[in-house]
Image (spheres, rainbow, N blue to C red):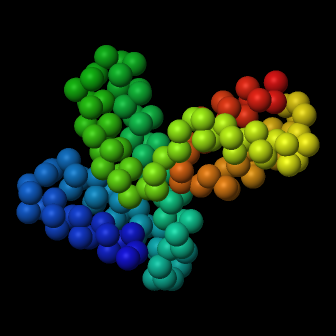
Amino acid sequence: MSLQKEVMTAMKEAMKAKDTNALTSLRAIKSAILLAQTESGAKEELSEDQELKLLQKLVKQRKDSAAIFTEQGRDDLAQPELDQAKVIEQFLPEQLSEEEIEKVVVMTIEDLGASGMKDMGKVMGIVSKELAGQADGKIISTIVKSKLS
């Protein structure tokens, strides 16, 4: 089932349950999907890769907003953002642990024969593609830096 259909089904359930937080999150996903479809010019379905990137972007926005609110001492505003991120993450594949990400990074470094920070871009590109939707780019970056330095 496409992401758009999954979101619509989840929206109906959230409406029946009167879950306003989930409904807000699901409407944000639906809006982003429609926007992405109209940007490409045609009313075609988004590819699975595009859907993953879209969901990751929405989760990152929510987490960044929550971090800013927390820094400013506004936990009352940060919590809804984190709750929305959790709802959106339900549509992402299972996230890998840091140990699993580290294994992929080490294998990629060995395959490329990478040595030093000059090869970070190559390693990041390959690992990011391989782990698309399964790991946060910030975590991947941190692990790659630690292995290459």
Q: Is residue 39 at all visible to an observer of this figure?
A: no
Q: Is residue 80 visible?
A: yes
In the rendered image of this protein, does residue 6 appear above or below residue 140?
Answer: below
120 with respect to 61 (left or right): right
**Residue drawn at x 35%, y 63% as measured from the top left:** 31
Determine the residue positioned at 78% across, 46% down: 108
Q: Which residue is drawn at the image coordinates 33% and 44% (left, top)?
A: 86
Q: Is residue 93 left or right of residue 148?
A: left
Q: Is residue 136 above or below residue 25?
A: above
Quarter of the image for residue 64 reads top left
Give the quarter of the image for residue 65: top left
Question: Which quadrant is home to the C terminus?
Answer: top right
Where residue 50 appears, as percent x and y from the top left, is: 54, 65
Q: Position of residue 81 (x, y in %)?
A: 31, 38
Q: Position of residue 10 (x, y in %)?
A: 23, 64
Q: Is residue 83 above or below residue 129?
A: above
Give the percent coordinates (x, y) of residue 39.
52, 71
